[in-house]
Image: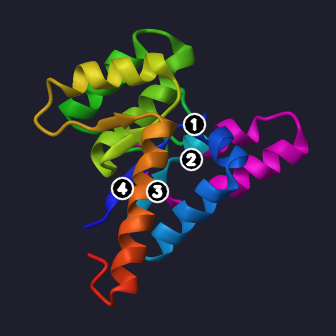
Amino acid sequence: MPKRFMFDSNVADALLADEALRVAVHSLMAAGVVGAAKTLVQDEEHAATPNPERRAALADIFSGLEVVAPSVFVLDRPNIDCARFGGPDEHAIYDRVWAGKSTDAEDGIIAATAHSTCDVLVTEDRKLATRVADVSRTLAWPVEVWNVNRFRTFVADEMNRTQLSAALGGNKD
């Protein structure tokens, strides 16, 4: 089963800046080596970008990702109609990330959803990464948290591994 990633909204900047990474990620996704998902939260955050060219570029970066329902039901937040109630692990992550600050609610939704739908949350937000990693240590099924550099290394390794396997005529698994 391919490793699945959830990208925090801020990861789009790194993908915009690095065409080789973007192409490699899409190649790995097309080959079924990795999977990637998003909630509508990321789309809404990108849609709020004032510059129309940048807004379109951000939307394009995330356009090929699978859309998954948020794993927590949060009153007074977008997409309440499609959110799931989630279990105790998802709520533990949301509560730790949210920490009573309405500005962190979207990050909490993304992190909780990453826990229930993906293997790795990729973010450049150190506060979010620390909070998710801290609470994940207490869970039976933790979500890994990577920064973009670690993700970039993984992508390069997978590109090398799959290209080597294809060159040798072997199985890509």
Q: Provide the residue designation for mark 1.
A: 78
**Nearer the N terminus, badge 1 or badge 3?**
1
Write the residue at 71% across / 44% down. Answer: 17
Instruction: Quote the CA–CA distance across marks 1 and 3.
Output: 35 Å
Q: Which residue is mark 3?
A: 156
Q: Residues within 10 Å of mark 1 (few under 14, many from 20)?
A: some
Quadrant occupied by the N terminus: bottom left
Callout 4–callout 1 Cβ contact below 8 Å: no
3 vs 2, front mark? 3
Amino acid type at circle 4 is Arg
Q: CA distance from mark 2 to mark 1?
A: 8 Å
Q: Residue furthest right?
A: 52
**Mark 4 nearby-residue class (10 Å; few <14, some 14–19, many ≥20):** some
Q: Which residue is mark 2?
A: 40
Report whether 21 appears left or right of 7.
right
Magenta-colored stretch includes residue 69: yes
> Amino acid under label 2?
Leu
Residue appearing at x 23%, y 28% in the figure = 136
Nearer-N-terminus badge (4/2): 4
Task: Name the N-terminal-most of marks 4 and 3.
Answer: 4
Question: What mark, if any, has residue 64 been given in the picture?
Answer: none
* Residue bounds of the magenta highlight: 43-71
Q: Which element carries disc 4, helix, strand or loop?
A: strand
Tell me the element at label 3. Answer: helix
Instruction: Give percent across and percent down for residue 158.
Output: 39, 62
Name the residue carrying label 4.
Answer: 4
**Which label's residue is closer to the chain start, 2 or 1?**
2
- Residue 98 x %, y %: 42, 17
